[in-house]
């Protein structure tokens, strides 16, 4: 048990998955409580959802990270920041995150700036980004980033964690860099046997607007062919064996972009949810009333696949009616389960304990 109240601040906060993980740690008896000292988010819809989900006033939002003065920040035991990945991600233009590049991903350096300004530095900082930040293209910039933290006095540990290792059926790989102000040993959380599949996170008989096909199909060898619900074209093709085995099982033959053409079996895992086009990139083949249909994942299902509760989604959707924004907020987030187990591992050995 951690007896004291953990003081926490988050940057690029989104809808607050670290805060959700801390809430679960509290509810499960691992920490006494936590106090959110501040959060920092510029997206207006995300701020609305964040405040609704966590019952937090917008007054705690510091807004644009470039305008934050570290000397004015309250002390925190823990900082968490998943800085923008658009210029590092393989699905983006990969412009990089060099300190003076002025890309969105270079905003991660603002945390370094603020860290140099604060009077009392946080004991632990967690950085998060896409796994491709460790690639050859970005290794020199990442090394510089890490060296800055080392020069300030932090001990570092880093690793790529996969959501499917932590009870979420999503193939989401994310890089985590942990910085400790005091030297200490640390082990990342071990993978947990995952028995869940995509279908465990889905609703059935959802609104008709999410369906891409009707209930009619044509069998050809070991494949099912489906017409688009709005035309007579046989647009969708499903490999029945791959569907049965929970694999990437089908293709939308009218879409040229590879990520958007894929269709996934409800018996397998979801691909990585993205901020920009989750609805297009997560097409699923499902069995309903003994018939297969193809549809898009719903915003509520996308939130579930990021580890949020149904009540969290309902709170957010009450203040943010835009489905596009709700998809974006899910794809932009950190998987709550991954953060939960990561924080749990940190607190086992943390000097803040007792």
Image (tube, grey):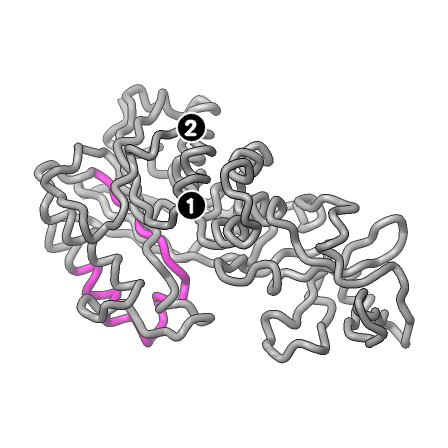
> How much space separates mark 1 and mark 2, taking CA atoms?
14 Å
Which element is circle 1 on? helix
Which sits in the foreground, 294 or 130?
294
Residue 206, position as x, y percentages in the image: 74, 47
Residue nearest the viewer, comparing 192 with 30: 30
In depth, the one of 34 and 188 nearer the eye is 34
Q: Quadrant of the C terminus?
A: top left
Across the whole image, how many numbered discs are drawn on residues? 2
Q: Which residues are magenta?
A: 123-147
Residue 136 on the magenta span: yes
Q: Where is residue 345, by image quadrant? A: top left
Pointer 2 residue: 55
Judge the density around disc 2: few (<14), some (14-19), many (≥20) Cα neighbours within 10 Å. few
Residue placed at 54% from the left, 57% from the top?
273
- The residue to which callout 1 is attached is 46
Q: Which element is circle 2 on?
A: loop
- N-terminal of the pair, mark 1 or mark 2, is 1
x, y (%) of residue 159?
37, 56
Picture disc at residue 89: none
């Amino acid at each position: 048990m951690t007896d004291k109240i953990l003081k926490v601040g988050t940057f690029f906060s989104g809808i607050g998955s670290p805060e959700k993980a801390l809430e679960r740690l509290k509810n499960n008896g691992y920490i006494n409580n936590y106090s959110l000292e501040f959060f920092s988010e510029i997206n207006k819809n995300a701020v609305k959802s964040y405040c609704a989900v966590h019952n937090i006033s917008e007054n705690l939002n510091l807004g644009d990270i470039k305008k934050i003065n570290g000397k004015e920040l309250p002390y925190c035991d823990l900082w968490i920041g998943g800085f923008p990945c658009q210029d590092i991600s393989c699905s983006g233009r990969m412009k990089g995150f060099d300190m003076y590049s002025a890309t969105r991903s270079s905003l991660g350096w603002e945390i370094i700036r603020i860290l140099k300004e604060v009077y009392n530095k946080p004991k632990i900082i967690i950085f998060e980004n896409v796994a491709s930040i460790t690639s050859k293209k970005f290794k020199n910039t990442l090394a510089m980033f890490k060296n800055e933290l080392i020069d300030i006095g932090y001990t570092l540990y880093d690793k790529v964690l996969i959501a499917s290792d932590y009870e979420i059926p999503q193939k989401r790989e994310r890089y985590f860099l942990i910085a400790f102000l005091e030297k200490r040993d640390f082990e990342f959380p071990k993978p947990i046997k995952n028995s869940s599949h995509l279908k465990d996170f889905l609703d059935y008989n959802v609104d008709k607007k999410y369906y891409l096909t009707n209930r009619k199909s044509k069998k050809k060898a070991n494949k099912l062919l489906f017409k688009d619900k709005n035309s007579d074209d046989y647009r969708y093709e499903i490999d029945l064996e791959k569907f049965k085995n929970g694999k990437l099982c089908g293709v939308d033959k009218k879409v040229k972009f590879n990520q958007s053409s894929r269709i996934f079996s409800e018996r397998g895992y979801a691909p990585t949810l993205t901020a920009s086009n989750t609805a297009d990139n997560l097409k699923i083949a499902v069995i309903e009333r003994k018939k297969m249909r193809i549809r898009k994942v719903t915003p509520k299902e996308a939130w579930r696949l990021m580890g949020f509760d149904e009540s969290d989604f309902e709170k957010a959707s009450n203040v943010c009616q835009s489905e596009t924004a709700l998809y974006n907020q899910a794809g932009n987030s950190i998987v709550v389960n991954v953060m939960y187990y990561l924080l749990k591992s940190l607190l086992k050995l943390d000097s803040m304990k007792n």
